Image: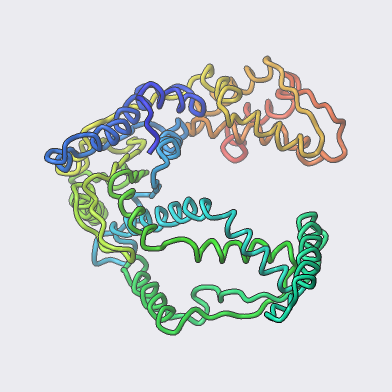
Amino acid sequence: MAVLTPKEIVEALDRFIVGQHKAKRAVAIALRNRWRRQQTPESIREDILPNNIIMIGPTGVGKTEIARRLANLANAPFLKVEATKFTEVGYVGRDVESMIRDLVSLAVHMVEQEHESLVWEMAEKTAEDKILDILFPVDKRESMDDVEKERVGKTRDKLKEMYYNGQFDDRFIEIEVQDSPGVGGISIMGPMGSGLDETSDFLNSAMSNLFGKKKKSKKVKVSEAKRILTEQEADKMVDKSKVTQEALFRVENDGIIFLDEIDKIAGNDTGRSADVSRQGVQRDLLPIVEGSTVNTRYGVVRTDHILFIAAGAFHMSKPSDLIPELQGRFPIRVELDSLSTEDFIKILTHPQNALIKQYQALLLTEGVELEVKENALKVIAEKATEVNDKTENIGARRLHTILTRILDDVMFNAPDTPKNIILDEKMVHENIDDIVTDVDLSRYIL
């Protein structure tokens, strides 16, 4: 995990997210506490639990983005799940333990890629030798004299040079590849998330180990063979047991789960069946957040030190509508601010991945330079605020719909348009004024 101070974490988040300083501070402290826990004596380390967070705020203000960027900073296994997709145990649907299994699978894939990157050069070298052997088989008999060996070596060196220059890339060769997993494998039908998918994976893996992995011959271009063989060689060089061990450690100590739409499972005490079902999901979530053990295909995972960040708009409910036990497991509550016109102007230009920068990059691929005037930015931000006030408030996502509408003709005609396009106040008014004025039209188009 990258060792960043809370200030550095907030500064890094500022590069992508405008405002929301309270939420950034809360997640920065929570992340730093993961590192602090690792430095404490073992006698107390296990007792230090993460401070789970509930972020309260309307849609489009940066809740998901804060959690996602935080995970990238920490290089931690991160999973975003919708609380509404889970159902109470005993009903058809996903059980809450599936989120831990999904997190472990993501962590294994992440660690596997890291380990493969360490042996990638070696794997490329092995793949290169295999391809050259297929293209130009070498007689490796022991009776070759020194002169013949030298001649073969020189020929091989010339061929390598041609290979590096891509002169063989379009030539077809036949290579052995592994059959895609699951083809002809065992499939067990059952309710989604019931754990039978895990059983299926386990049985397919066991059968594969027992009878060996099936291989088949395939004709591909040399350029594609490079990638396939390099991936296969890298996969062979990676120690799977070490990957699994490291992945499980990362999940248990650095894992982050973002529980979105948690307000949708917060029911009032009305006794209706829907509320009973919501409370059932909360009761099932409780042991996972509290700390329990979950069986996965890679081994047993303890959830005690996984950081849970929940988020919701809480328009129709409030955090106190959650069952008391679950409320207690989310000690930190942060309210995110609604976005103002000034915030919208910053969102359009300041972040590293700002919307204007994205559209400029897209149009540059066609050789078109998009210049955006400051007065245009101000009008776009004002129109976004106006539409959000008149219709549903979807926060910064409104900017995306408005920009798409303004630049619709430009994006369509980009290959045939002049190479310099200026987006000014006049162009903004021409494209969206009539829609913004008509509230009913705004609901459908913006």
- Of residues 348 and 341, the one drawn nearer to the viewer in this rendering: 348
Looking at the rendering, in which quadrant would you find the N terminus? top left
Residue 407 point in image, percent of width and height: 72, 33
Residue at 68% of width from left, 77% of height from top? 218
> Is residue 164 placed above or below 175 in the rendered structure?
above
Task: Tell me: residue 222, above or below residue 376.
Answer: below
Residue 131 vs 420, above or below: the answer is: below
Closest to the observer: 222 or 52? 222
Furthest residue toward front: 146
Q: Nearer the viewer, residue 206 or 360?
A: 206
Left or right: where does residue 152 sit relative to residue 436? Answer: right
Q: Is residue 251 visible?
A: yes
Q: Can you tell which quarter of the image residue 405 is in?
A: top right
Which residue: 75% across, 20% down? 426
Q: Residue at x 49, y 53 (%)?
A: 113
Name the spot of residue 423 as percent of width and height, x first.
Answer: 74, 23
User: What coloring was used for the rendering?
Assistant: rainbow
- From the viewer's perspective, tell me whether residue 352 is left or right of residue 430: left
Residue drawn 51% across the image and 51% down it: 118
